[in-house]
Image (spheres, grey):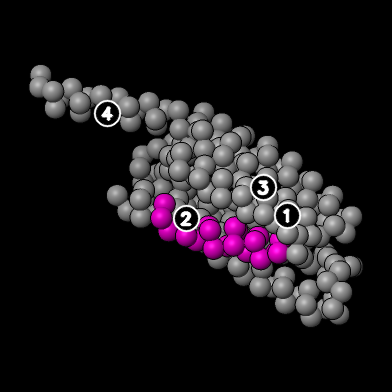
Amino acid sequence: MSDKDYLKDISEIKNLMNKSSRFISLSGLSGVLAGIYALVGAAATYWLVTTYSYGTLKLDGWVFETVILILFLVAFFSAATGIFLTTRKAKKNGDKMWDNSSKRLLVNFLIPLVVGGIYCMIILNQGRYGQTGGLMLIFYGLALVSASKYSIGDIQYLGYIQIILGLIASLYPGYGFWLWVVGFGFMHIIYGTWMHFKYDTK
């Protein structure tokens, strides 16, 4: 057996080990669409708040409830699209959608995300709107970094970017909304496009 054959065998063994320990069927296109949903939701929120808060930028009554609904809709459509496209990619690649690696991925992603979501709801309910954008970015970034151990390692870099944007938003709460737009909107589109061409088009 030649050196080339040995290297090929080692490469195949490495790929099998990665498949058994990591869920690698994440769709880059789902990131692009999540970014678009975030931009649409941000535009709707901006119009709603600037039109009906009468210059106070205070979220009261139905305005507050509608903003929360918009956030939930963005999260729901992003999750639904991600599940659909990832399932389709997993079937195409002959991978299992629900195995130990995907379970570990989901648990490590959801723990910081759910805790952060609950904390952000508490902050919003207290009327401390300036901090919520930064907190959402930070907890989402932590969720990505945590989940990257059981998926495509590249998503950790998106996580780091979100955390940095969140920390900047915490320092400058007046820009929290716009940094949220950058993190959840444009960064998802940019990163999702890069991931799509790196992994999905092979």
Q: Residue at x 73, y 53 (%)?
A: 170
The residue tagged 1 is 171
The reply to whether callout 4 and callout 1 are in contact (CB within 8 Å) is no
- Sequence-wise, the earlier of marks 2 and 1 is 1
- Sequence-wise, the earlier of marks 3 and 4 is 4
Front-lying residue, 82 or 1: 1
Q: Is residue 135 above or below residue 53?
A: above
Per the model, the C-alpha gap separating discs 1 and 3 is 13 Å
Assess whether residue 192 is covered by the magenta stretch. yes
Residue 191: mark: 2
Question: Percent x, y for residue 54?
Answer: 86, 80
Farthest residue to the front: give it: 171
Residue 146: mark: none
Can residue 28 be seen here? The reply is yes
The reply to whether callout 3 and callout 4 are in contact (CB within 8 Å) is no
Q: Residue at x 67, y 54 (%)?
A: 168
The residue tagged 4 is 12
Per the model, the C-alpha gap separating discs 3 and 4 is 37 Å
The residue tagged 3 is 138
Question: Percent x, y for residue 3?
Answer: 13, 23
Q: Amino acid at mark 2?
A: Tyr
Per the model, the C-alpha gap separating discs 4 and 1 is 47 Å
Question: Percent x, y for residue 120?
Answer: 78, 50
